[in-house]
Image (cartoon, rainbow, N blue to C red):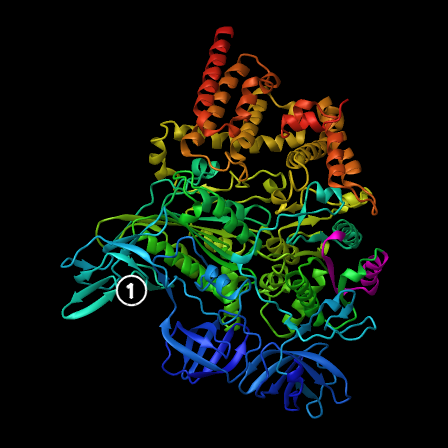
Amino acid sequence: MGKIWRISGPVVIAEDMRGSQVYEVVDVGDARLSGEIIGLESDKAVIQVYEDTGGLRVGEPVAGTGEIFTVELGPGMVGNIYDGVQRSLVTMKEEIGDFIARGTRIPALDPDKKWSFTPTVKAGDKVSEGDIIGTVPETGLIEHKIMVPIGMEGTIEGIKEGQFTIRDTIAVLENGGGKKELTMAQRWPARKPRVYKRRFDPEDLLVTGTRIIDYLFPLALGGKASIPGGFGTGKTVNLQQMARWSQTHLNIYVGCGERGNEMADVLHSFKKLKDPATGRMLQEKEIFVANTSNMPVVAREISIFIGITMAEYFRDMGYDVLLVADSTSRWAEAMREIGSRLEETPGEEGFPTYLGSRLSSFYERSGRVECVGSPRRMGSATVIGSVSPPGADFSEPVTQATLRIVDALYSLDVALANKRHFPTINWLQSYSLYADTVDRWWKKVSEEYTYVRNQTLTILQKEADLEEIVRLVGPEALPEDDKLLLLVARMIREDYLMQSAFHPIDTYTDPARNHKMIYVIIKFYEMSRAMVESGALVSDIAGMKLKQRISRMKDIPNEEFDKYIADLLLDIEKSSIHEEGGG
Amino acid sequence: MEASQLFTRQTKAIAVARRSLLIIESIPGIRYDEIVDVQLGSGELRTGQVIEVGKVMTVVQVFGGVSEVDLLRSKVIYKGETLKLPVSPDILGRIFDGSGYPIDGGPPVVSDSYLDINGIPANPASRIPPAEFIETGISAMDGLNVLVRGQKLPIFSGSGLPHNKIAAQILRQASLKAKSEEFAIVFGAIGVSYDDANYFIENLETTGALSRAVAFINTASSPVIERLSTPRLALTAAEYLAWERDMHVLVILTDITNYCDALRELAAMRGEIPSRRGYPGYMYTDLASLYERAGRIEGREGSVTIMPILTMPDDDITHPIADLTGYITEGQIVLSRALERKRIYPPIDVFLSLSRMMKEGIGEGNTREDHNNVFMQSYAVYAEGNYLREISTVIGSEALSERDKTYLRIADRFEQEFISQSETERRSVEETLNIAWKLFSALPVEDLKLIQQEYIDRYLPKR
């Protein structure tokens, strides 16, 4: 048992701490605040405290737990809400009320809840690390696979079937005379990547339901992406949309230093919404980690690692997992604050010099892998992090460090936000390195994917060039074919790229529908270009009923959509023939 | 606190006095973050805060600086307690300074309940998303940037712009409608001029709202350190009224720019590594610890709504104070110097302004069924008009088509008829929406693409 020797903000130095280890979890002070040792020097330990240190006194006790910071993994995580140090906020609410008191110990997994365990191996089977030994139906959407913890192997001496808590022994492992009792829960150090057999390139599309992302700047399962944007550009809404609709098995939403009301909004909306593919409640495939901006800074640093460890754990069961982190800037700021309290030499803008390596140690834990253990299975963890650049200036250290790591960028634009164009993903600045590999996936939806995508990007690029001219000479002075291009570009922006997160149909677009929507506009462009060439005026084309029908396609329910598009395409075809005949 | 006062301790062992810091020999029982008194040889008392405690030495930051501190006669008096506010229903109608002492000539508040001014974070799982409309009577807000209960919505202003007038108008008008309910106003003046503070107090007095208000006043001449405690005292009072007394509390904090400058001043004295423009790197977290105290909690009647006011240095919205605030708050009301020059009051820039909580607070049951459609159409029309305005300054309005000229005129009328109103005019949300409809009637009906047909049939004035 040590004693507090010095207190400076969230950093506490304790004496008489001989025998402690770095990253050991400790209880600090009479209030038993939770902390972690980040450095040792003779008998003194430097501790970062996860809770507010106001009111602490020198001489108060510091007790080591002998354990380093681990994440508790097992049935009971899905649908739960955790704070930055994996305390269940749902349990906390029941036990201590609406406010987060200091020094409260709350378990991550409900120790008393009984789960139905079905073994998939039998006595006498030889098993090793990562092998699935049984399953638990955790929610209607997630079957929790119970795996042999990493580092263990042996012969199953006995295994039970039935209702158990996470504390009960469900199997006994025999290895060279020694016996190990297995429960359904295990622990893993938050900062250490979990192991896998082999890593593969991401090549399948992660369907997010957001048109501009899926079609123009696709993200692959196991990929890593970043969303930087100034305030008011809708970063959080974008991330929420991804966490809501992404066609993965499990989504993890880490709210890191963000708004409490928004977190409440996410939590409440997920209780009401249904997954488009399965019709089940979204809550059955979500885990939340909520460290709002008024919660302790130091817990922010670890919360991201807790999230990614959970993601890897479910990946290891053979699932596709998406982790969204909002916002990695707050995470970086937490590192800056701790670094400065430790009197480390600062790097750019006061951020620690290890900012880049710490960021990549997080993003690099994404990936598509062959999991350890049998049966053979593939799993993936995809990571999307938002960045909040000060003054929307992308040259700042966190944005720049992130850009060197991620392979897809969704750049949010303040100018689009002021025009109320949502999502504000700027089509000229965003990119995805997965576009080439995911191409093959899209070809299954339509052979014309590459052509349509290139056409769309070209039209938008040309529009940007023409806009410059329009500002000088006015729109009326342009030649007809340029006017047409502006008209079609506007259709692409308003009838396709703009997507309402709040409209019941528009909020999620599946890939087939996505392709058809943009395909129709490109077809319309081809048709009207032929018309303009044979002398038609753009002002007449702008007044066509066809164009109005295209502008209504967003609201057409999915059941009627194919017919609606088929009719549209037919009429576009007719107009073209008519034009050829008449011209 | 009363109990601990018996054990008030003091030390004369001051080892170092430099800049605003005192390094004293440590004494058992002194707490990290606690507020202490520093008594000079002359008997003068200054306030200080413990910013680092060690076994051997303790660092105290003295508000007001260390001038005249001597190492022989000066002493540090400490209580072993962090700053707390006594609370009871009697705080309503009272005025306090930035340390929580009454300055209205009344007696001290008697209470056995003391709350830590730093508050305790609400469990995110206990929060409910804000959704109830607050009618401010101002069209640019009620129509396009709706304020809801539990929201934090700042006013981004600039020097010389009428943010105080607008805030006072909101205070007067929002409280009018809610009179039947348990409603309270908490006002925190941070480093403002005496006149500005007085302006608000008088406003509350004339409308009779003072009895439902609590004010914490730190004027420009008060100690800088109290700029940091003033908003915390105000929010602690607000939380008490909301969570323990079931009241809907509207908190006005002005001016956050003074708060941030105080934060910078004190950080610099401590020799901390500065971040952008000299402000400390933890300013986001610090501001969040204020703004995040807004909200609603499941199963509790009350709510805390916060309207911080800040003046953007050089009208720069990317300045760290405005920028970090914008990242934390749920939208912002931005005032425009261009509109002010056109004599438009309130000069609210509806493009830069935004209320993130709006979607939940409008529509049938809250305001009116057509609200969302009218909101979107108004933006589209005004944006189009503004775009053409910009083009016409280059190519001349003569080069525009008749349709474009109509939009130009509508943009002007939008500013003069919709945004503009008098300081005493209280428009109902219906009146606000009807003004928009009146403007729409000057447009071809097929241009109203963002409005459902049934609303057009119901609300568009017949020509």
Residue drawn at point x = 71 percent, y = 32 percent: B385
Determine which residue is flagged by label 1.
Answer: A168
Task: Left or right? Give the position of A190 relative to B111.
Answer: left
Question: Residue lying furthest top in this view?
Answer: A582
Q: Position of residue B72 (x, y in %)?
A: 69, 93
Is B185 colored magenta in this rendering? yes
Q: Is residue B54 above or below residue A440?
A: below
Q: Is residue A247 above or below residue A100?
A: above
Quadrant (top left, top right, bottom left, bottom right) of the N terminus of chain A: bottom left
Q: Quadrant of residue B25?
A: bottom right
Asked whether residue A259 is in view, the answer is: no
Q: Is residue A187 left or right of residue B415?
A: left
Residue A411: where, in percent of width, then height? Answer: 51, 45
User: In the visual, does B198 lie left or right of A344?
Assistant: right
Task: Check residue A474 for magenta coloring.
Answer: no
Image vertical order of residue A213 relative to residue A105, above or below: above
Q: For this rendering, which residue is in front, B227 or A246?
A: A246
Q: Nearer the viewer, residue A258 or B243?
A: B243
Q: Nearer the viewer, residue B341 or B308?
A: B308
The disc numbered 1 marks a residue on which chain? A
Q: Which residues are magenta?
A: B179-206
Q: What's the residue at 37%, 58% (across, down)?
A: A309
Drawn side of residue A263 relative to residue B313, left or right: left
Which three-letter amino acid code belongs to the residue tagged 1? Asp
Task: Kindly give the residue lying farthest to the bottom in the view shown.
Answer: B72
Percent position (x, y) of residue B406?
74, 26
